[in-house]
Every structure is written in structure tokens, then in C-alpha cells.
Amino acid sequence: MLPSRNLVKYGLRASNSSRNACKRIIIPNQRLLVRDESTTSSTPTNFSAPSRPRPIHPRPTPVKELPKTAVTWILGAAFCGLSGWGVFLLYATNLERLSSSVTRQVISNLKQSEQVQAVLGTPLELPPAFLFGDPWISGSVNMPAGHVDLSFRVQGPRTGGTVYFTSVRKDKGLPFTILRFKIITDDGETIHLVDEKRKPT
């Protein structure tokens, strides 16, 4: 019984020793593997040449648009030309109304009217409204179409006023009919210069 127990005992010991030997063989290898992994991960990577530099793109700077001199001069010249042409047209049309026979007749009647002389005084003048010294005549004078409508300022020694004159012709060959001929003074007084028979109701 004793030898068998010893054998079994020795066998167990042998098996234990063999297992320990295997453990000794395996464990060092595992440690080596772990050490190798740690050494490879902590070791810095060395390059044989410098890295390629990244391309540097310059930042675009905002460019302020400069005014085009040629276009500015053209627009300015066109504006001045149109303005001058408009002023010339106004002056020409006003001079045409002022020099018409109807306007001259109306002014002559005003200066000879006793009612106007009593209220405005004498002499009676038309105040200038332009730098050229001509008075401004508003309205239109269209003799071929049979329509005259005028208004302008008059000034006397006592006070001033605005003259309104309207005359129409119903048909060709017929005389003009005065519909309105009056002065409204600066004080608010109205002087009717048309005949009572022709005075509109």
C-alpha cells in the first residue's frame, strides 16, 4: 500500500511540477509579449525626412469699388444738359405767353381801368420773376384752338394782386367770349373787370 501511495504521491507531485513548469514557461512568454507591446506603443516614430508643409492660402482682402470717373462725368454732363434744356424751355414758353397779343391787351386794359387804379394805385407794374427781368405768366395761350387761360402777378403802389383771365371761342370764325377777368388783391378783395353782360353767373 505504501509504495502505491508513494507512486501516486510522486505522480501527483510530478504532475504538479510539470504544471508549474508549464506555467513558468507560459507566464514568462506572456510577460515578454506584454513588455513588447508596451515598448512598441511608447516608442516615438522616427521619420527619415521632414513632413510636407501644408499649402498656405492667402486671405482675400475686400476690394472697395472705386467710382468710374468716365461714367460719373457722363451722368453729370447729361444731368446738367437736361436741366439747362428744361430751364430754356420754361423761359421760351413764358416769353411766348408774355409777348402774345392777348397778354398785351389784358395788361393794357388793367393799366387803363379806373377800378384797378383806385385799389392798386398807379403806376401798375408786373414784378419780375426771373433773373432776366421778365414776369412769370402762368397758363396757356392757344389761339388756333380757341382757348386762352392766363394768370399773373401785378403790383401797384398801394397793394398787389393776381390777375385771372379766361377766354374761349366756341367755333371757328366766331369771336372770343371772356369768361373770367378779375383781380384778387393780397387783402382778399376781388375786382371784376369783365362787363356785367358777359359776367359769368
Image (spheres, rainbow, N blue to C red):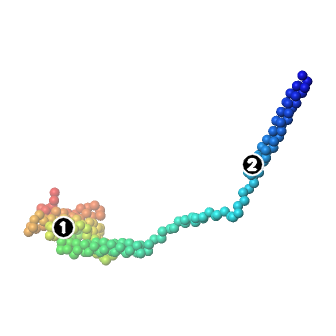
- The three-letter amino acid code for the residue at tag 2 is Glu
The structure residue drawn at horizontal position 85% and vertical position 30%, both measured from the top left corner, is 12
Quadrant in the picture for the N terminus = top right
Q: Is residue 68 shown above or below 39? A: below
Q: Is residue 122 shown above or below 29? A: below
Query: Is disc 2 placed on a helix, strand or loop?
Result: helix
Rendered location of residue 163, percent (x, y):
24, 66
Q: CA distance from mark 2 to mark 1?
A: 115 Å
Q: Is residue 87 left or right of residue 172?
A: right
Rendered location of residue 118, percent (x, y):
23, 68
The structure residue drawn at horizontal position 16% and vertical position 62%, both measured from the top left corner, is 179
Q: Which mark is residue 37?
A: 2
Q: Is residue 65 left or right of residue 39?
A: left
- The three-letter amino acid code for the residue at tag 1 is Val
Q: Residue furthest bottom?
A: 132
The quarter of the displayed image where residue 139 is located: bottom left
Q: Is residue 6 shown above or below 184? A: above
Rendered location of residue 28, percent (x, y):
81, 43
Q: Earlier in the sequence, mark 2 or mark 1?
A: 2
Q: Disc 1 marks which residue?
A: 148
The quarter of the displayed image where residue 26 is located: top right
The structure residue drawn at horizontal position 18% and vertical position 69%, both measured from the top left corner, is 142
> Is there CB contact under 8 Å for labels 2 and 1?
no
Mark 2 or 1, which is nearer the eye?
Answer: 2
The structure residue drawn at horizontal position 25% and vertical position 70%, both measured from the top left corner, is 137
